[in-house]
Image (tube, rainbow, N blue to C red):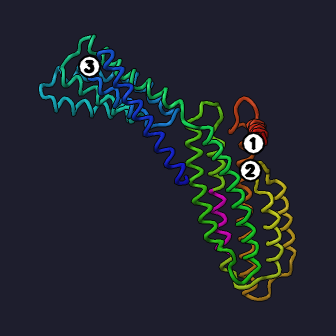
Amino acid sequence: MDRESRIKKTLITALKISVGSCAAMYIAEALNLEFAVSAGSITLLTLLTTKWETLRLSLVRLLSFAVTVALSFIFFEHIPSGWIAYGMFLFVMTALLEGFGWRAALSVNAVICTHFLATDNFSPEFILNEFYLVLLGVSIAVLLNLYNNNAHRKKRVLAGVAAVETGLTSTLGKLAEYLMSDDETGGVWEDIKTLEADIEDYLDLAHEYQDNTFSAQPGYYIDYFEMRGKQCGVLHSLHHEMERMRGTPKQAGIVADYIMYLKNYVTEMNDPAAQLEQLDRLLGAMKEEELPKTRKEFEDRALLYHILMDLEEFLKYKRRFVISARHGRLKNTKSYMERHVTDKIRELKKSKK
């Protein structure tokens, strides 16, 4: 994430928290609720999540409210020491929430528990007061988290897809040149590391986008950037194998030509089946080559085979991604690939207007 985007995200989050917390406190005071300030705290704690997480967490907090009241009553009415009773409450509540994977709900439950501890009041009116605090706090958080600038986030994800493909194309070209030269050209190693770092950033952005959308779209972009990250790992291996070569056997030119051919097919929607078939033919042709006569030739030829195996792995990562996208694991009611292409066409039309 660039500095400008990070600052903008921080400012939006800060604005949501300040406005939401103040609004919750104001409404709670207008309703004459006791501990009105806690409504602001509940809003704050709930806002520090994504849209989907806010909804899930809000529901959990409402559902666990009854458990909080019951446990508070049991411990505070039967254990004379307040701090021991509070400790027992936290122990049991934490165990329950951890068991259900709801740890994030603990903070609000603990706040409500302290109100019962401070007042020792379990009347229906006070219990309803506490419920209104929770309901008010989470409701304002949900409303504010409906705005999260996700359309802009999606544009950045799509830009990331294009940037990664450009980076992969450039790096494959440099690797092909490096294979045919004695000296490294263009800082291939640094290019791969930079590309890996960019993919990590885009993967985080894809998670943010996915967690903040109400569409039924599955985690396509998450899987996409994870696949590209694995391909970057393969590029590291490719570069390492090339570094170990002590010469430039004649077969290196054939492999370099294949890499140059391959770089034209790293695009998002390309199914690499044809490239895998071409690789099989290349391997078959290399097996028909005359056997190496010296140890050095043998070692360099073996490294070339390792390079081809790395390229095969590079393509298989993409192949598995495309197959899973095509056969339903990454689609919903209709073909995700069709919807994705439609979205891109729509965005291109908008950009031309």
The residue mark sitting in front, 1 or 2, is 1
Which circle marks residue 297 in the picture? none
Mark 1–mark 2 distance (CA, rounded to whole Å): 20 Å
Q: Residue sitting at 12 percent across and 28 percent down?
A: 81
**Toward the viewer: 295 or 72?**
72
On screen, residue 206 versus residue 96, left or right, reads right
The answer to whether any part of residue 72 appears in the image is yes
Mark 2–mark 3 distance (CA, rounded to whole Å): 56 Å
Is there a contact, CB below 8 Å, between mark 1 and mark 2? no
Give SS at disc 1: helix
The answer to whether any part of residue 326 appears in the image is no
* Residue assigned mark 2: 268
**In which image quadrant can residue 83 be found?**
top left
Give SS at disc 2: loop
Q: Position of residue 309 (x, y in %)?
A: 73, 66
* Residue assigned mark 3: 34
Q: Main secondary structure of the magenta part?
A: helix
The residue mark sitting in front, 2 or 3, is 3
Is there a contact, CB below 8 Å, between mark 2 and mark 3? no
* Type of the residue with mark 2: Glu
The residue mark sitting in front, 1 or 3, is 1
**Toward the viewer: 98 or 194?**
194
**Toward the viewer: 208 or 152?**
152
On screen, residue 11 versus residue 325, left or right, reads left
Mark 1–mark 3 distance (CA, rounded to whole Å): 53 Å
* Residue assigned mark 1: 351
* Type of the residue with mark 1: Ser
